[in-house]
Amino acid sequence: MFSGFSHSVRGASHEKTGLVCQDSSAFKLGEQYAVVVVADGHGSKKHFRSHLGSRFAVEAAIEAIDRFYERSEELEANLPENHARIIRNIEKQIISNWNRRIDEHLAECPVTEEEKSKFKPEDFAAIPPESYYGSTLVAAVAGADYTFGLQIGDGSLVAVLEDGSAVMPMAYNESAPANVTASICNSNAAKMFSSFYLPNSRLIALFGSTDGLYTSFGSEYDFLDYHSIITSRLNDSGTFGNVILQNLKKRTHYGTEDDISLACVFHTKLLEEKLGLLQEKVSENKARSAQRKAEQLSKKAPK
Amino acid sequence: MSNEKFTDPALDAMDDNLLDFDDDPLSATGVSRKSLVIFFLIDTSGSMKGKKMGELNTVMEELIPEIRRVGEADTEVKIAVLTFSTEVQWMYANPIPIEEFEWARLRANGVTSLGAAFRELNQRMSRNGFLNSPSLSFAPVIFLMTDGYPSDDYKAGLEELQGNSWYKYGLKAALGIGQEANDNILAEFTGSADTVVHAYSGEQLAQMIKIIAVTSSQIGSKSMTLSDDTGKELGEDDVFAAKQKLLGQQIQELVSSQTDGSDIPFDTGW
């Protein structure tokens, strides 16, 4: 019923500085549901293991969601009434899973002298161990006729609905502009999640991406149109998968130079039914984009 | 979890030879560089009439190519100009990329509604307003120029603006023109006396506008997310504070290196 893909590409700036890709991404295909997850490790000095932290975040999210779906009938029956509480519990479970992985990793791989050598002893002592692994997290679930998602820190979710429209279901938080991001390593992380629940909606496709993708666009329209184009080609995801991967590399190279992750799941039967509609949407979007550019030029005249 | 797929960034990073391809259907949605918006808040009240406004128009026309050079490397600079007199008005309906920006010569008339300008800036400085570009990677630069005392309740307007996160993290600088401009009010706006300068003549006006606009664009588009020059870790709040401090230092250094000039002050006969 569902299919999917995920890519994480190393940012052009990280290639220059020799920093490994700090992003992680994954998708999970269940019988009745599918999951996309991406995470963006912070990559700065005190988050020196954040490439692992992002991977642990992705694993922690899939583990938590799987656990809630062990009793899927009960979960789906409760979602319409109690989605806020259920999503909050999933978030708490993710944090718990992530912290467990951090503890296990630290026990197995204690901080090395080389890692410590980059700090003065007192500065190193002041860093909480979970900060070594700091990361954002974006995760979303597509069910039969609903979807929900959660996120901490920046990143984007895009849903392509059965009417062919592409929407960003998560409300934007203006309180943290310009690269100030929440993290799963924050001590009050459980209170820093944002979430959404979209009932009565069949999705053709669901995408999660780290902020390196979003910031490579000049407008939100272009960002959404990008997802529409991808969705209209998912029937040939084998060949098109490589096109997407190369495009992500191009976007980091010519865009903001950040790591980029994109994870996608799509409903294969619905996609097949709606392919004509999706292709029409892509043509309409192209015409609208040209119209917007013309309008912008006309607006350029002094007021 | 047999259907679970993880991406291996190491494998993905290996194939790097396909950055250029014309037949990419995804290229319909262009790639944007990191972007920065510079807001100019310009007093066009009646007291600016004559030499001050003439000089300001000339220097702004000359300035655009200079700022353009700042953006050439990896940052797209966009310009938004808000004028305030009896009314407040934007020069263009949206921030304009510097490559396309053309200065529309301003005229002076009316009173100094600085508070109204602060409120208008607060409204537009939002993701739903002028800062809606996803590629926006830096907090904005906000540059205020005025020659007189506000004629409205500027404190109420400033209070509203101070609640705006973009203002809080933005780089702020101000230029007082002539004797009447009140540096204390300008420092209230920028948050520090170091980022306030004064021009008493046409020559100084040209020098100061260029110093502030070019320096703030350079610092505004600088990535300082990892560490400062000492290698000490900076938090996000520290980054913005460090940028504002650096702007103040550089402005003061550049201002002190300028010659006094021998041209005639605005307030004595111009």
Image (spheres, grey):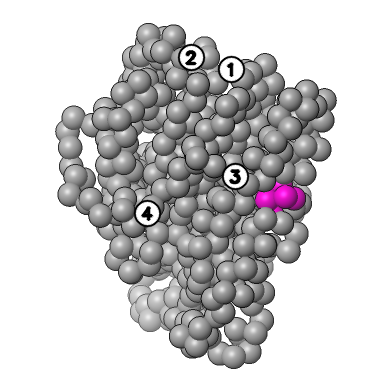
Question: Which comes sooner in the sequence, label 1 or label 2?
Answer: 1
**Residue reaching furthest to the front:** B2
Gap between marks 1 and 4, in whole Å?
A: 31 Å
Residue at x-position 35% and y-position 20%: A235
Gap between marks 1 and 2, in whole Å?
A: 9 Å
Label for residue A202? 1
**Residue B33: x percent and y percent?**
34, 48
Task: Kindly report the secondary structure that dominates the magenta region of the rendered protein.
Answer: helix
- Magenta span includes B64: no
Q: Is residue B119 left or right of residue A178?
A: right
The reply to whether callout 4 and callout 2 are in contact (CB within 8 Å) is no
Q: In this view, does B74 lie above or below A105?
A: above
Q: Dot 3: what SS?
A: helix
**Residue A132: x percent and y percent?**
57, 71
According to the picture, the residue beneath numbered tag 3 turns out to be A62
Which amino acid, mark 2? Answer: Leu
According to the picture, the residue beneath numbered tag 4 turns out to be B9
In this view of the protein, which residue sits in the foreground, B218 or B33? B33
Gap between marks 4 and 2, in whole Å?
A: 30 Å
The answer as to whether the residues below labels 1 and 2 share one chain is: yes
The answer as to whether the residues below labels 1 and 4 share one chain is: no
Label for residue A270? 2
Q: What stretch is highlighted in magenta?
A: A91-95
**Residue B29: x percent and y percent?**
33, 31
Q: Dot 1: what SS?
A: loop
Question: Which comes sooner in the sequence, label 3 or label 2?
Answer: 3
Gap between marks 4 and 3, in whole Å?
A: 19 Å
Q: Which chain carries label 3?
A: A
In this view of the protein, which residue sits in the foreground, A111 or B266? A111
**Residue reaching furthest to the bottom:** A121
Residue at x-position 72% and y-position 43%: A90
